[in-house]
Image (tube, helix red, strand yellow):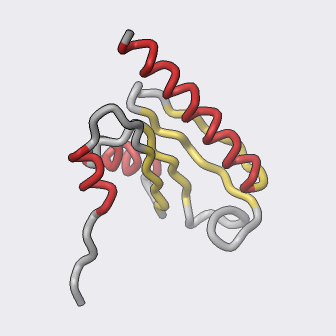
Amino acid sequence: MEPTPDILAEIGRRKQDQILIGFAAETENLVPEARRKLESKNCDMVVANLVSQDGTGFESEENEVVLVQRTGENLRLAKAPKRVIADQVLDQILKLRLALHHDRN
């Protein structure tokens, strides 16, 4: 077997004015592992979920995530249908984009 390329890390190395969002599925140490991924891959935010938890994640209609942000903030999104979580993630991306755009002007 050959290792697959780390696409997120490569995009992070080439990133300029883009906002880069990563995803982390962890079994333990959720926030520290997401923060490590955010830093090592040059992300602006990592959407992290604990996959060892019953009732959320891959084989469920619901999820519960933590948004780990470059600003140092961690925003917990309560357990909800995946569509609701997706809308909340997109809302946070828009806020991040507006904040970064404001900082550049």
Horizontal side of residue 84 vs 97, given as left or right: right
Above/below status of 21 relative to 24: above
The residue located at (43%, 50%) in the rendering is 22
Tell me the residue at 38%/31% (across/down).
70
Q: Horizontally, is 5 left or right of 51 in the view? A: left
87 and 29: which one is in front?
Answer: 87
- Relative depth, front residue between 91 and 36: 91
Q: Position of residue 8 (x, y in %)?
A: 33, 56
Residue 76's image quarter? top right
Q: Is 82 left, or right, of 58 in this rendering? A: right
Residue 87, position as x, y percentages in the image: 70, 43
Classify the position of the C terminus by image quarter.
top left
Q: Residue furthest bottom?
A: 1
Q: Judge whether 102 appears above or below 54 on screen.
A: above
Q: Position of residue 73 (x, y in %)?
A: 47, 28
Q: Residue 3's quadrant in the figure?
A: bottom left
- Identify which residue is drawn at 68% across, 39% down: 88
Instruction: Give x and y (percent) for residue 46.
Output: 45, 45
Give the number of callouts: 0
Horizontal side, residue 70 vs residue 73: left or right: left
Query: What residue do we see at 63% from left, 70% from top?
Result: 58
